Image (spheres, rainbow, N blue to C red):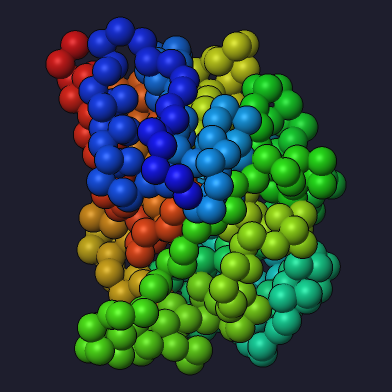
């Protein structure tokens, strides 16, 4: 990397300069290498910024053509797809999953509802036995294994973050009732109509645009020995968090999410590839029409963003309290977003996208440098604070 000035581009409407200042500050502190942020307010794009470098080794700019893998921010995309099918009468949150997917009834799961599945209450954090990455990337194999998995806890007795398995569980529901894979559904029903760059299962022709993820979620090199020991217990192969985040060994290894085969597969909980402008536009279209396209009507949107996990209930995988609606992480201690009413999803290492109808706000931030967090990234929260300060002062 050279020491030349960090390049920035994009647009900011008058009155929103505080967001641009916060964005530049993330680079000035050295926390960001390449990133983009976008904001829609009252159905209008008011911020669309990108800056920094495509990777940690060259001077290639991170520009408006750059794409980014966004980890669990993908779950919000999948949750919107499910909600669209609920809106069309193809799915019912209160119906049993097995009504749409008969094989799911195995191992005592016949009464589990779609709502319980989407709110991480079914205890299917990973298949019972270890599996390879190749098996996990093959749709029919992984969904069959998950359908035949015994719940890790009694369904409905608690909730625990289905870090990677969530996507195939929700995605198979989409496939069963619609006939299309989640990737194809997103392409044809969300990305295409909105004219945005958004993929679950990236075409080879777009691979050259993907900025590589820099760093790891949990970097233990040089860490305090006590902290390192704690992380090893929390994320150990036998722990629920370790099994959920690594899918029982399949997703363990440095640089895995920079691999072409991982980008090409459909992993609807973790391998969405997009940019901030596209994600913010998608969430804006859950509030009202954007360029003539509205993804969700208010009744379904309000149902989907209502927290159903008990207040203060500890997550059985992440230990701390988390809050879920119908596939969305809702406003709570783990996911502050812009405050009450916000719904969306953060991604490992820092990305986040959400909407807050109360402020008529849609927000997205994506980046290539990983921070050690699953949510509440300080870079994103500075940007959100700047956004809300502008709105609340007007």
Specify whether residue 135 is in view: yes
Which residue is depicted at the point 63% across and 30% down?
A: 65
Q: Does the image show residue 81?
A: no
Q: Residue furthest top?
A: 14
Residue lying furthest left: 393
Q: Residue 310, located in which quarter of the rendered image? A: bottom left
Q: State left or right for residue 202 relative to residue 43.
A: right
Q: Quadrant of residue 196?
A: top right
Residue found 26% across the figure and 27% down from its top: 21
Left or right: residue 253 versus residue 316 is: right
Residue 234: where, in percent of width, then height? 36, 83
Q: Is residue 379 above or below residue 112?
A: above
Q: Position of residue 299 (x, y in %)?
A: 48, 29
Eyeballing the image, is 263 above or below 194? below
In the image, 120: left or right of 19?
A: right
* Residue found at x 82% / y 47%: 204
**How many numbered tags mark residues here?**
0
Identify which residue, 272 or 184, lies in the foreground. Answer: 272
- Give residue 27's position: percent from left, percent from top: 33, 41
Q: Is residue 261 above or below residue 383?
A: below
Q: Residue at x 78, y 74 (%)?
A: 134
Horizontal arrangement in the rendering, residue 95 relative to residue 334 (left or right): right
User: Which of the two residues, 264 or 114, is positioned nearer the viewer here?
Assistant: 264
Q: From what the image shows, is residue 192 above or below residue 375?
A: above
Q: Position of residue 203 (x, y in %)?
A: 80, 44
Which quarter of the image is occupied by the C terminus? top left
Q: Nearer the viewer, residue 289 or 114?
A: 289
Q: Nearer the viewer, residue 251 or 331?
A: 251
């Amino acid at each position: 990397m050279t020491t030349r000035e960090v390049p920035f581009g994009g647009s900011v409407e008058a009155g929103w300069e505080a967001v641009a200042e916060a964005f530049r500050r993330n680079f000035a502190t050295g926390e960001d290498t390449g990133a983009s942020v976008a904001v829609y307010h009252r159905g209008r794009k008011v911020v669309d910024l990108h800056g920094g470098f495509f990777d940690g080794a060259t001077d290639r700019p991170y520009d408006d053509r750059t794409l980014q893998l966004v980890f669990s921010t993908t779950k919000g995309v999948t949750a919107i797809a499910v909600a669209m099918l609920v809106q069309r009468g193809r799915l019912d949150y209160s119906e049993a999953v097995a009504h749409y997917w008969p094989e799911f009834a195995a191992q005592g799961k016949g009464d589990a509802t779609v709502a319980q599945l989407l709110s991480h209450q079914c205890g299917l954090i990973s298949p019972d036995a270890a599996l390879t990455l190749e098996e996990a990337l093959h749709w029919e194999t992984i969904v069959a294994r998950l359908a035949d998995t015994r719940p890790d806890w009694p369904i409905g007795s608690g909730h625990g973050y289905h870090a990677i398995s969530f996507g195939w569980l929700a995605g198979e529901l989409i496939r069963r009732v619609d006939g299309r894979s989640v990737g194809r559904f997103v392409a044809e029903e969300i990305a295409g109509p909105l004219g945005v760059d958004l993929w679950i299962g990236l075409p080879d022709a777009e691979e050259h645009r993907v900025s590589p993820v820099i760093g790891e979620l949990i970097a233990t090199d040089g860490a305090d020995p006590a902290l390192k020991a704690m992380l090893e217990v929390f994320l150990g192969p036998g722990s629920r968090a370790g099994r959920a985040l690594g899918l029982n060994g399949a997703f363990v290894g440095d640089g895995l999410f920079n691999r072409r085969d991982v980008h090409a597969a459909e992993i609807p909980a973790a391998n969405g590839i997009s940019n901030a402008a596209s994600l913010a536009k998608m969430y804006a279209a859950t509030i009202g029409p954007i360029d003539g396209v509205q993804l969700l009507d208010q009744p379904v949107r309000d149902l989907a963003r209502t927290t159903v996990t008990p207040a203060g209930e500890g997550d059985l995988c992440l230990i701390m309290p988390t809050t879920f609606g119908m596939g969305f992480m809702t406003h709570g201690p783990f996911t502050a977003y812009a405050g009450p009413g916000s719904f969306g999803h953060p991604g490992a290492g820092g990305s986040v996208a959400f909407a807050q109808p109360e402020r008529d706000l849609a927000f997205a931030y994506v980046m290539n440098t990983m921070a050690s967090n699953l949510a509440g990234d300080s870079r994103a929260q500075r940007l959100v604070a700047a956004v809300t300060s502008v709105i609340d002062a007007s």
